[in-house]
Amino acid sequence: MDYICQPIGFSQMTVTLILLVFIVGYIAIAFEHPLNLNKAASALMTAVVCWTIYILQSQSSHLVNEELLHSLGEIASILFFLLGAMTIVELIDSHNGFEILTQKIKTNSKQKLLFMITVITFFLSALLDNLTTAIVMTSLCSKLLTEKEDRLWFAGIIVIAANAGGAWSPLGDVTTTMLWIGGQITALNIMKQLILPSLAAALIPAIIIAYRFKGKKLTVPALSSISEQEKKEGRIILIVGIGLLIFVPIFKTLTHLPPIMGMLLALGLMWVITTLIHKRKQPEDAKKYTVANALQKVDTPSILFFLGILLAVSALQSVGVLKELATVLSTTLKNDYLIGTALGVLSAIVDNVPLVAASQGMYDLTTYPTDHPFWEFLALTTGTGGSAIIIGSAAGVAVMGIEQINFMWYLKKISFVALLGFGAGISVFLLQVWLSH
């Protein structure tokens, strides 16, 4: 992610125009329901218009095309990772795997369930990654909760806990992974320094939201009337599916290939296993258990929305807006922790990946050596800051697609709580730094 483009021959007017288009597109996404226009349409149009302005104003269309193809390559790896994870989750669901899992939950208190989901999401996110964990846990909650409003609140805490859990692990969030690969942090140190601040960022919102469910009882749905053979198949797919998702970060660590390769391998293996399990069934009976059927259920508009929003952000990155923004913050704020906090808040509006990439380009290891508190703080803020807005993180976008969360609902109900968690994480981190010095 150290590819910072140096655009040729464009004016300040071009940058302003692209920024204006981005802001208008963002507003259209926020007011998706009043406008009665799917957010994917707004995001895709915003992306194309931004890149069109850029190439028309540039003196080198060849350079712009190279930048666009580079951005598309990086975005495609995220999208296919998302597609693979969602397909595996759909396969587990079609085999009643989540229903089997819900039967293991013994509490009938929604408040206790909220804390259980928060803690499981937090630690599972560090083991898998925040995107995959958010998909799995949201799918699980959709089987446990019958009321739509309850599912939305649980989805909100899943986004917060998944992003917080991803921040303290080198495998949990793409920005932490970038800093780890770039040599700015080491694995054991980042886990040691960020686990408590990240836990605070997840638990404070959970405690606040839990008040909403005080005294409310949960009715665990009965397991569908399925045969013993189907239950056995469901258990196999559940264990294999979760196992393969856990295998993805291990494969990345062993091979140094990007996570998408591990996810594609996992999906291929699931394809083979489901084919073998159902090979003796009649085609019409086996159809609902196939990968092809699972792919049809995946929320394609959400993936197209993700493509559009990331392409639009990459246009801002290519014209140098994000790097310039990072430089302005550095010269204006002149304080490591104020800069890190500002970048964390910004990561809720634009993708945290180019912001961290810009920071890596601005500050070398002679300024801030490996395991300097600045890098740790940057991992914390850019990892947890995205929770403030539903489209501020990959986990948020995925959950938004699964539960059809309204942008403005999240902004009104969850954003303030997420920011309180963000502030709590920062406070714990600064306390740790103060005590250690």
Image: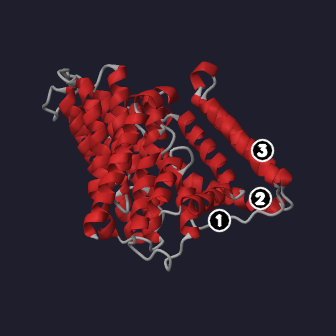
* Residue 375 can be seen, yes or no: yes
User: In the rendered image, which residue does mark 1 sit on?
Assistant: 4
Image point (26%, 55%), residue name: 196
Question: Which of 43/273 is in front?
Answer: 43
Q: Give x and y (percent) for residue 331.
A: 59, 63
* Residue 133 can be seen, yes or no: no
User: In the rendered image, which residue does mark 2 sit on?
Assistant: 64
Q: Residues under labels 2 and 3: Cα distance?
A: 17 Å
Ranked by sequence position, the earlier of labels 1 and 3 is 1
Q: Give x and y (percent) for residue 187.
A: 34, 69
Question: Which of 80/211 is in front?
Answer: 211
Element type where label 3 sits in the image: helix
Q: Residues under labels 2 and 1: Cα distance?
A: 13 Å
- Of tags 2 and 3, which is closer to the observer? 3
Image point (48%, 38%), residue name: 389
Image quarter for residue 116? top left
Q: Which amino acid, by three-letter code, is at mark 1?
A: Ile
Coloring basis for residues = secondary structure
User: In the rendered image, which residue does mark 3 sit on?
Assistant: 17
Which mark identifies residue 134? none
